[in-house]
Structures are given as C-alpha cells and as structure tokens.
Amino acid sequence: MKPFLTVSALNLFSFASAVPYAEYILAPDSRTLFPVSVHNSNGSVSNAETLTSPSGSAVFEDDAATAYDFGKNIAGVVSLNIGSVSDSNQYIGVTFSESSLWVSNKSSDATADAGKDETLWFHLTAPGKYSAPRDKERGGFRYMTLVHNGTGKVEITSAEVHFTPMPHWKDDALGNYTGYFHCDDELLNRVWYAGAYTNQMCTIDPQHGNALVHLGTINSSVSDATNVTWYYNYTITNGSSALTDGAKRDRLVWAGDMAIAVPGVVASTNDVISIENSLNSLFAVQNRSTGQLPYAGRPFPSTLSFTYHLYTLIGVTDHYLYTGNLDYAASHWSEWKLALNFSLGFIDDTGLMNVTSPPDWLRFGMGGHNIEANSILYYTINQGIALAEALNDTEPVASWQATAEKIKSAANELLWNDSAGMYIDNETTTLMPQDGNSWAVVSNLTLNSSQIESISTKLADRWTPYGAPAPEAADAISPFISGFELQTHFLAENVTAALGLMRLQWGFMLDDPRMTNSTFIEGYSTTGELHYAPYLNDARISHAHGWATGPTSSLTFYVAGIQLLSAGGKAWRIAPSLGNLTVADAGFSTGIGFFSAKTQMASNGGFQIDFETPEGTSGEVKIPRASCAGNIVLEECNGNHGTLEIEVTHANAGPISVADVPGGKWKVTFDCV
Ligand SMILES: *[C@@H]1O[C@H](CO)[C@@H](O)[C@H](O)[C@H]1NC(C)=O
Ligand SMILES: *[C@@H]1O[C@H](CO)[C@@H](O)[C@H](O)[C@H]1NC(C)=O
Ligand SMILES: *[C@@H]1O[C@H](CO)[C@@H](O)[C@H](O)[C@H]1NC(C)=O
Ligand SMILES: *[C@@H]1O[C@H](CO)[C@@H](O)[C@H](O)[C@H]1NC(C)=O
Ligand SMILES: *[C@@H]1O[C@H](CO)[C@@H](O)[C@H](O)[C@H]1NC(C)=O
Ligand SMILES: *[C@@H]1O[C@H](CO)[C@@H](O)[C@H](O)[C@H]1NC(C)=O
Ligand SMILES: *[C@@H]1O[C@H](CO)[C@@H](O)[C@H](O)[C@H]1NC(C)=O
Ligand SMILES: *[C@@H]1O[C@H](CO)[C@@H](O)[C@H](O)[C@H]1NC(C)=O
Ligand SMILES: *[C@@H]1O[C@H](CO)[C@@H](O)[C@H](O)[C@H]1NC(C)=O
Ligand SMILES: *[C@@H]1O[C@H](CO)[C@@H](O)[C@H](O)[C@H]1NC(C)=O
Ligand SMILES: *[C@@H]1O[C@H](CO)[C@@H](O)[C@H](O)[C@H]1NC(C)=O
Ligand SMILES: *[C@@H]1O[C@H](CO)[C@@H](O)[C@H](O)[C@H]1NC(C)=O
C-alpha cells in the first residue's frame, strides 16, 4: 500500500482519491528517499540495514562496503548524515548503478563511451551532514554503494537521496497523474505505470543536462578506467523542466525519442510544458538559412539526421494533436515549413528522398532511398497538411499532397518485396528492417490491408525469447522501434500479437533481475544479454529511456481504445480492442478536457463500454465485433442525445462503427439474444 493512502486527509482529497489505480504509481510520494534493503556487503559493516530508515546507525570500519537497493530506479542528490568519525581524516565513497550488473565498490556504471564513472568521495572531518554538489546528482540508479577505505571508523546515521526528476511538480504530488490504465492482466498494468514513471525519470531540471565533457575523447583505449568524471551542469533548455532521452544519459533532448515518449506522457501525466521546453530548444538552434534542425539539443555537436530532423516537425504536429493548442503550432509554423522544405530538397527524380547522412537511432545503413526515412517523411507531410489546414495556410497543401502521393507510389514500386511480404531497406539490399516496415504501416505508406497484415505477421515471426529484433542494428532489440512495431500489430488488428509482444519484451524488461523493475531500458541483445550493439560499453546503457515506453500510449489508445483524431480530441474515436482481456479501463486529460473508456466483456459474449468525452467534441464509436447475434444499445447518460439501437443479425458481424457521436457520457451495451 502506498503511504500516501494513509498520510493526511489533505493528500487523500487533493489527488489520491482523484487518481484511480494510484497504488500502481511508482513516483515517490516524497522527494526524500532512503534505501529499502541491503543488496550485499563486504568487510566490517555493522547494522548496515538500519540505513533503510531515516535514523539508523551503520558503522563502517577499515576497508568495507555495503550496496543498498532502493527497490526501483530513482535519481537525485545524495546526502550522508555522519554520527561519528574515529578521526578527522575519514572518507566515505558513493557509487551508483541502475543495473545489479554494475554494483561495485570501485566505480559507478557509465555515462561515457568507455570506462566506469568515478566514485563520489566525501572527506569526513567531523560529524554532520555531507551533501553532493548539485552537478553530482545521479540521474538514474537503483543501487547505491557506500564505501569506506583505509583504517578507522565511520558511523552513518542516514543515507538519503533528494529525488530531482519532475522538478516543476510539487514535492508531495509527484504521483498526481491525469491519466490511468487498468486491465485484468497485472503484468500489463505494471508495464503501463513503469512507462509513465520512466518518462517522469527522464523529465529533468534543464540546468542539469549532461555536459558531455568526454564526447569523442574517451574511447575503448580507456576501457579499464574506473575514474571517468561526470558533470550534470549544462543548461539544455529554457524553462524549469525538460523531457530528455534518458535519466542517467544522455540527459539531452532528442526529437526521435520524443515520438514515443510524448504520447506516453499525454496518456499519463500530460506534462506538456516539458515537451514544449524541449521542442523549443531544438528550434532555437535551427539553421535559419537551410532550415536544418539538430540531431540532438545542446550541447550535442551539429549533425544532420534526416529522421531526427523530421521527428522535430512531428513533435509540433503531435503537440497540436494532443493539446489542441494552435497558438503553439503557429509560433513555430514558419520554421516548420522551412525545415520541411529542407527535407523535400533531397527528393530525387524517383520521387523518394535520398538520405545522404547516416545518423538515426544508431542503426546501420541509413542511406539512399531508405524506407524508414521516406515513411517518416510521408507521415510528416500528411501531418503538415492537417496543420496547414488548421492554420488556414493552404498555399503549400496541393504541392505537399502531390509530393506525398509520389513518395507512396515510388516506395511501393521500388521497395515493396511482394514475395517476402515486407519492404526492403533500400533498392540495393535484401535486408527488411523492423523500423521501416513498422513505420510504413504507422505512416499509412502501405496501399492495402493485406500489406499491413503481412508485415505484422512477418515481424512477429522474427521474435526471439526476449522480444522483437531489429536486424538493421545487428543483434539489437530496440525498445524504441518495437514501440512502432506494437502500433503496427494494432493497425493490423492483431491485438494478440501486440499484447503478446508487450508481455514478452516489456515483461522481460521489467522482471529480469538485472533490470530495475520500474523503468525501461534503452536497448539490449537478441539473446537477452544487456549488451546494446551500437555501444562498446555495456555499463553505459540507460535503464530509464523514454523511447522505450511505447506500451503506455498503446494500451490507452488501442486497448482501452481512446483515440484523439484532431486538435486535442475535438474529433475522437472510441475503439476498444481487448484481445484476451476481459476488462480495460483508461482515462486521460488533454487541454480540451477529460476522456475515458471502460470496456467489460461478459462471459456470455455480451459487453459494456462506458465512455466519456468532452462536451462540444464529436467522434466515432467503433464497437467490437460481436460473437453472437444480439442488440447494441448506445445511450447518453444525461439523456441529452437520445438512444440508438442496432440489431446485430449474426455472429462475427462488425466491427460496427457509429459516426458523429456528440461528446458526453455514454454507455454502450451489447447483449446476445
Ligand atoms: C563485495 O564483493 C563481491 C566480490 O568481489 C562483489 O561482487 C560485490 O560487488 C562487493 N559488494 C560491495 C558492496 O562491495
Ligand atoms: C580514500 O579515498 C580518498 C578519495 O579517493 C583518498 O583521498 C584517500 O587517500 C583514501 N584513503 C586511503 C587510506 O586510501
Ligand atoms: C494535480 O494536478 C491538477 C491538474 O492536473 C492540479 O489542478 C492540482 O493542483 C494538482 N494537485 C497537486 C497536489 O499538485
Ligand atoms: C584515471 O585512470 C587512468 C588509468 O586508469 C589514469 O591514466 C588517469 O590519470 C586517471 N585519472 C584520474 C583523474 O585519476
Ligand atoms: C561543468 O563542470 C566541469 C567540471 O567542473 C567544467 O569543466 C565544465 O566547464 C562545466 N560546464 C558547464 C557548462 O558549466
Ligand atoms: C542500403 O541498405 C543496406 C542494409 O541496411 C545498407 O547496408 C546500405 O548501406 C544501404 N545503402 C545506402 C546507400 O545507405
Ligand atoms: C544519393 O546522393 C548521393 C550524393 O549525391 C549519391 O552519391 C547517391 O548515388 C544517391 N543515391 C541514390 C540512390 O540516388
Ligand atoms: C481559419 O478559417 C476559419 C474559417 O474562416 C476560421 O473559423 C478560423 O478561425 C481560421 N483559423 C485561423 C487559425 O485563422
Ligand atoms: C491511407 O492512405 C489512403 C490513400 O493511399 C487513404 O485512402 C486512406 O484514407 C489513408 N488511411 C488513413 C487512416 O489515413
Ligand atoms: C496474430 O499474431 C499471432 C502472433 O502473435 C499469430 O499467431 C496469429 O496468427 C495472428 N493472427 C492473425 C489473424 O494474423
Ligand atoms: C516489482 O515491482 C512490483 C511493484 O511494481 C512489486 O510488486 C514486485 O514485488 C517487484 N518485484 C520484485 C522481484 O522485486
Ligand atoms: C492472455 O493470454 C496470455 C498469453 O497467452 C496470458 O499470459 C494472459 O494471462 C492472458 N490474460 C488474460 C486476462 O486472460
């Protein structure tokens, strides 16, 4: 039970009662955290376990160390309260690790390309409180090891961490979610909340981004070093919070990562200001003459990535889709068009964009008429058309439409391999990538549903016991690209495949003992080793990466089935798809109001959907396929909009869609006759 359920009546009133299923929320209810258990200990440490409380007494003597476990991934500034020292020349060192693999009394896990990060040493001259400087907070760790060296004794009375993520939220309301999800599969419930928490862990004080002091200087020649320095002292965005790629690293703004993180944020915390601060930081360094946007935000060196350039543009159209705030989109519109024109300038006479600079999500072979990049371009253009129409700037629309149609026909002509039933990476290869095939479906580059079904089937055929592989990145499993694969299975209407992949891959990422049981890892190997092909240094892998949170939005948007079609949900679709679940219940808020849908399947084939959408909106209800003949009744709970009855004449009819349903509280029931 979370403590805030019993603390004060005020807390109960302010959010615990308002947030359903709050017992699943992993965000702490106070910023002051203590370890929950001892992981292991060496040398003479007495009463090590007393540091799981705010007033303990652990005595470290001579060479000794204890590794503490916080039970989940956390982040923040460590303080030690020292009760006594045997003399004025004692030291306690602190090391950190997200994974149990890198627990050590010599070093932390890593933030650089090689080596391990140095121990944080406190020189103890007298009893008192010793706190790390703010640029020595640690951005993600589940394990914290306290090390005593030399001779002598130190009594530690507490080892606390001041939790620093979500800096702009109230200290005692970090679990004040606007969204929730619940179903009758506990693993999926934990996955949803771990995704929400991962994005909170990646939301940092922008004054404490990574300074990248070792970029390009530390390489495999220093791979044994246990003293690599790290500084979280670079200001990466304006404002008081920023959504970054990862809690431990890079702690930088990456637009590609946001394509998965942002919908997850919307479905859980609706923390729009952090998204805006991050997007603004990318436009702030746009090249005003060419329109080129950065690969990553400051201080990452200027680099051209065809895909991340477009992901920044998707960031703006997503912002409009999820908030309905046209002013924000308008404020970036001229920069947006300039940047799109930059990409369109690489379209050659085939009709496809020729990628001439390889950086992407660290896959190899990103070049030429690449299917992923062209799908993303196709998607961006279509999003841009919708935004141009909302802004009444219709001048570019006809030309964008023609360009998009040409991309679609050329991609299908040149890159679709009909016998394989998938797209190839480019015309010179037989490699069929996970990213481009998933993105082709997500972007609607496909011409028909049989292509979508084929891609879904072929992708699922490739799963290993640890998840969906990305052959375009050697032996990697990419939780980022697998987030798009999830959407692909939902769009193929194979909910079994989508839920199967969540249970397999995200279940592994939660439950494996090397993981944090709370946040999702950046990448790993197809064999389940925690080695990520693009990196030489396994200790560097981030265990809290927003790009790995795909299930959070997918469970809300596809399983509970609450879909925003335009402008913050002014147009919406309710389309529950439960697979083998018997109940799915979700809700979230956007700038225009609250959306929810709860679907319950009865054992006799009947079902009930209770949903709510804001007044003044309208949408479509896509009613699940009925397993028997019967009657569907749609009724508005306040009686404002009457009742609609639909007769289902035979089993497996449908799915039946009802269009132009006005916003409000509705109940849909289906009973077999
Ligand atoms: C204790 O020693 C073992 C074996 O060398 C090591 O794996 C472990 O990390 C050490 N733990 C601490 C807290 O020093
Ligand atoms: C303990 O570690 C500190 C920090 O590295 C160092 O200055 C000190 O000399 C060490 N003490 C002994 C006895 O090794
Ligand atoms: C929780 O969030 C809502 C808005 O989503 C806000 O009105 C409320 O003040 C917040 N509560 C606390 C305790 O921060
Ligand atoms: C870190 O260790 C390497 C070799 O292990 C050494 O060359 C370097 O001087 C050390 N740096 C510091 C700051 O101690
Ligand atoms: C961050 O701290 C390091 C070490 O003190 C320093 O070299 C670097 O200049 C600092 N960077 C910024 C942006 O303050
Ligand atoms: C085409 O794709 C293959 C496989 O990904 C890759 O090796 C090759 O470099 C790509 N071609 C270009 C021009 O990038
Ligand atoms: C893409 O452009 C590069 C650089 O201009 C050129 O060398 C390459 O042949 C082009 N690729 C294709 C597939 O046209
Ligand atoms: C676009 O035009 C419509 C119809 O004239 C108008 O209602 C709307 O306010 C305009 N929107 C903008 C952003 O100017
Ligand atoms: C997908 O594209 C086709 C045209 O190729 C269009 O008819 C269809 O409406 C699009 N589907 C969606 C969901 O946008
Ligand atoms: C859905 O995907 C699963 C694999 O997870 C597969 O066994 C099944 O045949 C697929 N169903 C359809 C209708 O394609
Ligand atoms: C993982 O976390 C869940 C809560 O999210 C908890 O119930 C479970 O016991 C934890 N599992 C392990 C192995 O610690
Ligand atoms: C659905 O099926 C999966 C895999 O077969 C199983 O693990 C899960 O428990 C089932 N869930 C429910 C709610 O029946």
Image (cartoon, rainbow, N blue to C red):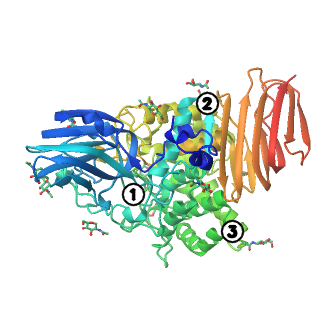
Asked if ligand 10 lies within 8 A of label 2, the reply is: yes
Q: Is residue 418 visible?
A: no
Horizontal placement of 214 versus 16: left or right?
A: left
Quarter of the image for the C terminus: give it.
Answer: top right
Q: Residues within 10 Å of mark 2 (few under 14, many from 20)?
A: some
Question: Whole-percent x and y of residue 17?
Answer: 63, 43
Q: Nearer the viewer, mark 3 or mark 1?
A: 1
Residue depicted at x 26% and y 38%: 67
- The disc at residue 642 is none
Q: Amino acid at mark 2?
A: Thr
Tell me the residue that label 3 is attached to: 388
Q: Is residue 6 visible?
A: yes
Do the numbered discs 2 and 3 sit on residues whose CB atoms are within 8 Å? no
Tell me the residue that label 2 is attached to: 496
Q: Give the mark, 2 or 3, whose residue is nearer the N terminus.
A: 3
Nearer the observer, 388 or 211? 211
